[in-house]
Amino acid sequence: MKSAELPGLHAAQFAFASIVSACGTGFRNDMVSRGFSMRLHSSGVEVFPAAMSTLAVLLTILLFPSPGCAATRALFNGKNLDGWQQIGPGTFVVEGGVLKTVGGMGLLWYTREKLANATVHVVFKMGGGPKSDSGVFIRIPVKPTDPWMAVNHGYEIEIGNWPDDYSCTGAIYTFSKALARPIKPVGKWNTMDITLDGPRTVVYLNGVKVTDYYEGQPVPPKHPGSADPDRGPRLNSGYIGLQNEPGGTVFFREVSVKPLR
């Protein structure tokens, strides 16, 4: 029987092709390990053995989700600060579906869960000139009651176009030296992907690796009398947060998370 003669097959193929496209190589490898083979082409996807396997694969996905296709979840809903809490000076406001920093130094932290073994995806732009300053805090071990708890017990992935490679966008502030500086000009949107893989932290900025840091590797000492973060180990899991500083404004269009496994 030709595949065109199978009722509902084209709809199933369209749905499956969408899933394959969205989930990528990891998902396809997982499906192959389950005994299916597939070939993508311009009109959809062919699945072997037998045309009906397309329907079977869709049922397999629903009943036994693939670790290669973990769902991305939005942490910022684009409407309000539901799930977030502000501590310290200043605030964040939502304007036109975008988070905007106002004053500081404060912290807007996500209250609903700790994150580990996941990638945090952030879309941001600097809008207040060369002194725009913010950061994404990770691995905050307990619910913070003061912004300095995040500074001294978590890590800050810096957002700021500063000259020092230890404090530029994508570096772990004063802990790791940036491998590259692919920040876009003020007013342009940037993407940042922060992967928490056990004790390893990897940061990509606009598709370029900026940080690859393992817990325990040598770091520069804290300068006496400075406001730099305290040295010492951080946990594999923790809360995350966004920093607001009294310098130029920073905007966040998206904050989401995708489990690694």
Image: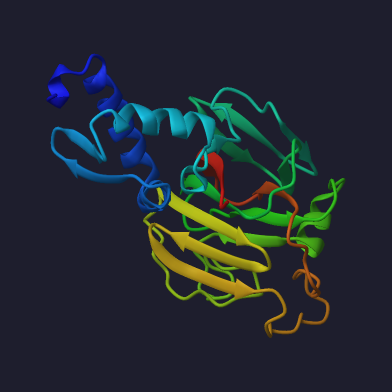
**Count of numbered badges drawn on the protein:** 0
Observer-nearest residue: 186 or 206?
Answer: 206
Vertical placement of 238 versus 215: above or below?
above
Residue occupying the point 36% across, 48% down: 28
Residue occupying the point 58% across, 75% down: 166
What quarter of the picture does the N terminus occupy?
top left
Q: How is the image coloured?
A: rainbow
Observer-nearest residue: 118 or 58?
Answer: 58
| Residue at the outermost front position | 1
Vertical placement of 167 versus 256: above or below?
below
At which x and y percent is residue 235?
78, 63
At which x and y percent is residue 75?
61, 35
Q: Is residue 23 left or right of residue 247?
A: left
Vertical placement of 96 versus 71: above or below?
above
The quadrant in which residue 172 appears is bottom right
Observer-nearest residue: 83 or 16?
Answer: 16
Residue 132 shows in this picture? yes
At which x and y percent is residue 26?
41, 52
Residue occupying the point 82% across, 57% down: 148
Residue 189 shows in this picture? no
The quadrant in which residue 195 appears is bottom right
The quadrant in which residue 152 appears is bottom right
Residue occupying the point 73% across, 46% down: 107
Q: Is residue 16 left or right of residue 144?
A: left
At which x and y percent is residue 23?
39, 43
